[in-house]
Image (tube, rainbow, N blue to C red):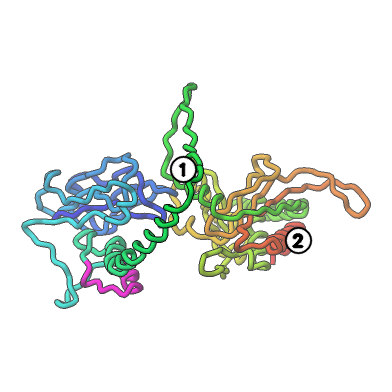
Amino acid sequence: MATNILMPALSPTMTEGTLAKWLKKEGDTIKSGDVIAEIETDKATMEVEAVDEGVLGRILVAAGTEGVAVNAPIAVLVDAGEAVPSAAQAPKAAAPEAKAAIEATPAPAPRNETKPEVRATADHGERIFASPLARRMAQQAGLDLAGIAGSGPNGRIVKADIDAARGKTQAPASAPQAAQTSAPQATQTSAPQATQTSAPQPTPVSPPQATPITAPHDAVPHSSMRKVIARRLQAAKQTIPHFYLSMDVELDALLKLRADLNAQSPKDGAGAFKLSVNDLIIKASAIALRRVPAANASFTDEAMIRYHDVDISVAVAIPDGLITPIVRQADQKGLAAISNEMKDLAARAKSGKLKPEEFQGGSFSISNLGMFGITSFSAIINPPQGAILAIGAGEKRPVVRGSELAIATVMTVTLSCDHRVVDGAIGAEFLAAFKAIVEAPLSLML
């Protein structure tokens, strides 16, 4: 039976993606687990594996197509020996009118007039096909899967079906309430308006119109990643109450430790390493968070989230924008392990080969622009985290030690805090712990 291959959701934030490349062609036999295509998401380029077996009968979305909605059909899979349906006979999916419609109403299941689709029901003891997420959501909502029609491939119940079912169960309760409240509101608002004297009303102000660009220029279309970065950063700046704490930290002891450790590294082999200042900063931040666990936190409307693990997200610049691969449990790893892991993560980030679990999550972020000569800056918090540490360049500065003037290598660090979760005292305590570790770095070896 002909089956649609749908655009997968490869990350929680993905609503659409670019079908970068087909790795199979029409007529190829496909087995479960075969890599059939490469999809560019809002974060990386990932491979898509086949779920079912059969023959790739027809490709519906050409390679290089942008803005392909999640759950939209991208190809048709047929059984071996089965005739490939024409475009008019191919399984259809609801054409989305907007991105919101895509999320609420996914493509209907493929139909075959000659071979009716079997709906598994609990009454007949047949298996009910549903995604793990759909099963969990149904259990939490108290819904019976047997009474829900699946819209996924071969009648599989997916998240959107559970959302639709929950909406149906909630609609009857909300309608009478709306009917009851609409009448009183009308009487309460209409009477005062009749007795009030007319007062001058403010003239509506139209939003400023963008001035057309007439100068010679190039228009570079936004990539999926750039759109997500713009949307997330705007929301973060508008909804998170940022405040900033800065501190100067002397680096000379840290630089000496780095040079001594690199000198002891094997020239080659599995144990070889080359530590960067950023590697030591990651470790120092992780230890400081372990000493000040209140800074290793996130805010939600229901509770303050205090993370058990110290997972450091490190900002890495890539051609399309920015991505934050994560060094998990950084406080428990040695410097060489952090260094080698960070080099691997950064290389795969720039080539778009990170796995979702390698850049999604994290409890605290670091953004280092010191290598570009930036002396100080304030970073935007990476939600849902509660803080991000901005690292400036180390430079020779005059410092006062006792009653004497000396020269030291100093860097300025700025902690951006979400004031809902990291108060000023907590942020200051974290920076004090970070400064103590960096200026007496032998504790990094413990």
Q: Is residue 418 visible?
A: yes
* Residue 226 - label: 1
The disc label shown at residue 436, or none: 2
- Front position among marks 1 and 2: 1
x 9%, y 49%: residue: 83
Which percent across, then down, holds residue 115? Answer: 8, 60
Q: At 57% across and 69% down in the image, what residue appears?
A: 306
- Whole-Å distance between the Cαs marked 1 and 2? 38 Å
What's the residue at 72%, 49% (across, down)?
412
Q: How many marks?
A: 2
| Left or right, residue 233 beside residue 13 | right
Q: Which amino acid type is shown beneath numbered disc 2?
A: Ala
Contact between marks 1 and 2 (CB within 8 A): the answer is: no
Query: In this orientation, which residue lies closer to the viewer: 201 or 31?
Result: 201
Quarter holding the C terminus is bottom right
Q: Quadrant of residue 243?
A: bottom right
Q: Residue furthest left?
A: 114
Query: At label 1, which amino acid type do we have?
Result: Arg
Q: Residues within 10 Å of mark 1 (few under 14, many from 20)?
A: some
Q: Crowding at label 2, few (<14), some or many (≥20) Cα neighbours within 10 Å? A: some
Q: Earlier in the sequence, mark 1 or mark 2?
A: 1
Q: Residue at x 71, y 63 (%)?
A: 425
Q: Position of residue 249 (x, y in %)?
A: 75, 53
Q: Quadrant of the N terminus?
A: bottom left
Going by the image, does 56 lie left or right of 49?
left
Residue 283, given in percent of the width and then of the height, sits at 64, 59
**182 or 188: which is nearer to us?**
188
The boundaries of the magenta stretch are: 133-148
Is residue 225 located in the magenta-colored stretch of the structure?
no
| Front residue of this view, candidates 343 and 74 | 74
Tell me where residue 296 sits by quadrant.
bottom right
